[in-house]
């Protein structure tokens, strides 16, 4: 390795203040790791703080010409062969993505890997497509005591039915600390958990810019009747370390290895490490994987490769989701948001009388690795609200009697061309003022049918329709805040709600007048996110819900339930007397 950069130097390291959780300057450990593993490396530094940048440069012998206030400035001057991302977690994935796009060969990212499941999933896909080698900084995999413990477990010295127990005291949280022990359990067992079950104490605290819990108890079930238990927050007893219990004995792993079996007690030598610093070992191993491949021809993996170590951060979000839903959560993880960020939303207690709902949908948002599509999430939400749901395939012809046993129609698809059978079935339904809810992508359906667009009020402008007076619609994936504009008409259990990363629709076309029910806002932009069509009040549009997991959120289900109720009530009020009686 000839060139490397540390992005996020941090403040000058000092003795930690008791109870202080922010400002640990992990960039210094990476800088020292590069110096130890690659003594001749040309090291670069990036930090927006001039004081922090100068101190880091002086510590590691980095001249002013190789110090930069931003990653953009760094890449304008040079593309290092390797970078370490040592910022606060919210910048981990954006900066790692930038490094991949700039052609950096080896990228070390501090833990936690990301601040929600979606960005982790997307970045893993990107890094593998681009061929970048990425390691998550779970450097304890290189510490001799843990390497030896793994060897002893694999040799059967503790027997079967193993249980790992790890504790973190000092009021720490899962994402800041316990992810290391998650990863260590995965390393010792050489496996990924099947599921995670957790209970937490969450009082709205934030650390490093994201929501954290105050205390937690977590159980992870592994294949082969193996388990791990993690306790975080309360003062650790015993102090520090990891223990592994099995049918034949107990192993305590700390600075040394202590083994109790039926044959007695003994201390086990851990062996010598190649490098004094585990960070140096991690960075050296990462660099050795660049350009290398395994026996199967796949890209070689370092011990901390993202394909191994992303699981630890995903386990953290699985634990939070388990606490939020009061259910155990299976892995691989399919919750794409950060569960603690949405726990403040109340659950809607009311349930309407069951209706027969026809869901006219296509798959929509079927990401690789997802076990459910957006359509499936909507379907399950409708069922959870107590309704009888019939799924109609929007990509197929509609039978003439497709809506014969239907109380309410929900449209969720983006089939642009309108089949004759769809016009034949839907036209009399809309004309009779029967209730309709357009969910999310349904505003992009039937682009060649002007009447449909007048019925739904606002619509998606496809790229080939754009012109000077009608720009193409956009949908950046961003968090947003929802505000209820008409609480009298649109009855929700909240007046304001925060949503994690979802599609935020922009520059929609207008085909008829609408009454805004809910407004979404993000980064200074506002957009109607629920509306009722003035001329056709039986039509209500509810936009949130791109992915399946969005429909698991109480705020989204609450809005969906209110949309159904408003469409049904408006249809009954405006329909002819005969239709109302029917």
Image: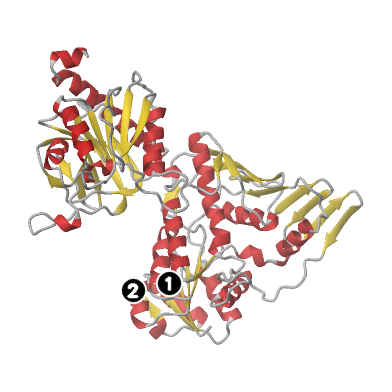
Question: Image check: 574 left or right of 41?
Answer: left
Which residue in the rendered view is the most extreme toward the bottom?
40
Question: Image check: 49 left or right of 571?
Answer: right
Please name the residue shown 19% across and 22% down the image: 571
Q: Secondary structure at mark 1?
A: helix
Question: Image check: 564 left or right of 533?
Answer: right
Q: Write down the residue under mark 1.
A: 52
Q: Is residue 471 above or below residue 395?
A: below
Q: Nearer the viewer, residue 563 or 317?
A: 563
Q: Which mark is residue 323?
A: none
Determine crowd level at label 2: few under 14, some 14-19, many 20+ residues with C-alpha closer than 10 A: few
The quarter holding residue 37 reads bottom right
Please name the residue shown 37% across and 72% down the image: 71
How far from the left and from the top, in percent, is residue 500?
36, 46
Q: Nearer the viewer, residue 353 or 89?
A: 353
Q: Write down the residue under mark 2.
A: 72
How far from the left and from the top, in percent, is residue 227?
68, 45
Determine crowd level at label 1: few under 14, some 14-19, many 20+ residues with C-alpha closer than 10 A: some
């Amino acid at each position: 390795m000839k060139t490397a950069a540390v992005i996020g130097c941090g403040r000058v390291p000092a003795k930690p203040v008791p109870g202080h959780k922010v400002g640990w300057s992990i960039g210094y450990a990476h800088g020292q790791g590069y110096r130890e593993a690659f003594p001749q490396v040309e090291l670069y530094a990036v930090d927006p703080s001039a004081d922090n940048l100068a101190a880091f440069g002086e510590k590691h012998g980095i001249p002013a010409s190789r110090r930069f206030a931003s990653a953009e400035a760094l890449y304008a001057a040079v593309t290092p062969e390797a970078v370490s991302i040592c910022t606060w977690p919210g910048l981990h994935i954006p900066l790692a993505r930038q490094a991949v796009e700039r052609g950096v060969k080896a990228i070390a990212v501090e833990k936690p890997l990301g601040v929600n499941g979606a960005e982790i999933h997307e970045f893993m896909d990107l890094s593998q497509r681009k061929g970048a080698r990425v390691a998550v900084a779970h450097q304890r995999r290189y510490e001799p005591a843990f390497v030896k413990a793994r060897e002893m477990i694999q040799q059967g010295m503790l027997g079967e039915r193993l249980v790992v127990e790890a504790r973190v005291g000092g009021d720490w949280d899962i994402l800041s600390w316990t992810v290391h022990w998650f990863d260590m359990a995965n390393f010792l067992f050489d496996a990924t958990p099947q599921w995670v079950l957790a209970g937490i104490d969450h009082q709205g605290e934030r650390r490093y810019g994201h929501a954290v819990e105050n205390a937690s108890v977590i159980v992870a079930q592994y294949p082969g009747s193996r388990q791990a238990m993690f306790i975080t927050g309360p003062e650790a007893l015993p102090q520090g370390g990891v223990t592994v219990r099995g049918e034949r004995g107990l192993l305590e792993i700390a600075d040394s290895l202590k083994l109790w079996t039926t044959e007695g007690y003994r201390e086990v030598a851990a062996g010598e490490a190649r490098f004094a610093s585990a960070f140096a070992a991690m960075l050296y191993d990462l660099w050795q994987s660049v350009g290398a491949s395994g026996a199967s021809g796949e890209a070689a993996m370092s011990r901390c490769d993202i394909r191994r170590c992303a699981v630890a951060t995903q386990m953290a979000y699985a634990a939070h989701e388990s606490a939020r839903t009061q259910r155990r959560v299976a892995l691989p993880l399919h919750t794409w948001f950060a569960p603690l960020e949405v726990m403040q939303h109340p659950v809607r207690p009311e349930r309407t009388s069951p209706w027969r709902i026809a869901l006219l949908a296509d798959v929509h948002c079927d990401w690789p690795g997802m076990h459910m599509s957006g359509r499936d999430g909507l379907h399950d939400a409708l069922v959870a609200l107590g309704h009888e749901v019939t799924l109609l395939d929007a990509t197929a012809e509609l039978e003439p009697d497709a809506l014969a046993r239907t109380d309410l129609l929900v449209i969720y698809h983006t089939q642009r061309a309108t089949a004759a059978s769809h016009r034949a079935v839907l036209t009399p339904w809309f004309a009779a003022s029967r209730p309709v809810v357009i969910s999310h992508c349904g505003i992009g359906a039937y682009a060649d049918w002007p009447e449909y667009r007048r019925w739904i009020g606002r619509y998606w402008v496809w790229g080939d329709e754009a012109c000077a007076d009608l720009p193409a619609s956009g949908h950046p994936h961003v968090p947003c805040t929802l505000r209820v504009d008409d609480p009298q008409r649109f009855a929700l259990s909240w007046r304001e709600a925060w949503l994690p990363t979802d599609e935020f629709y922009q520059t929609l076309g207008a085909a008829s007048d609408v009454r805004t029910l809910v407004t979404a806002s993000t980064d200074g932009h506002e957009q109607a996110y629920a509306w009722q069509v003035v001329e056709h009040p039986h039509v209500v549009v509810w936009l949130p819900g791109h992915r399946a997991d969005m429909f698991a959120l109480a705020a989204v289900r609450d809005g969906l339930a209110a949309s159904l109720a408003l469409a049904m009530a408006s249809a009954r009020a405006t329909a002819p007397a005969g239709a109302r009686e029917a």
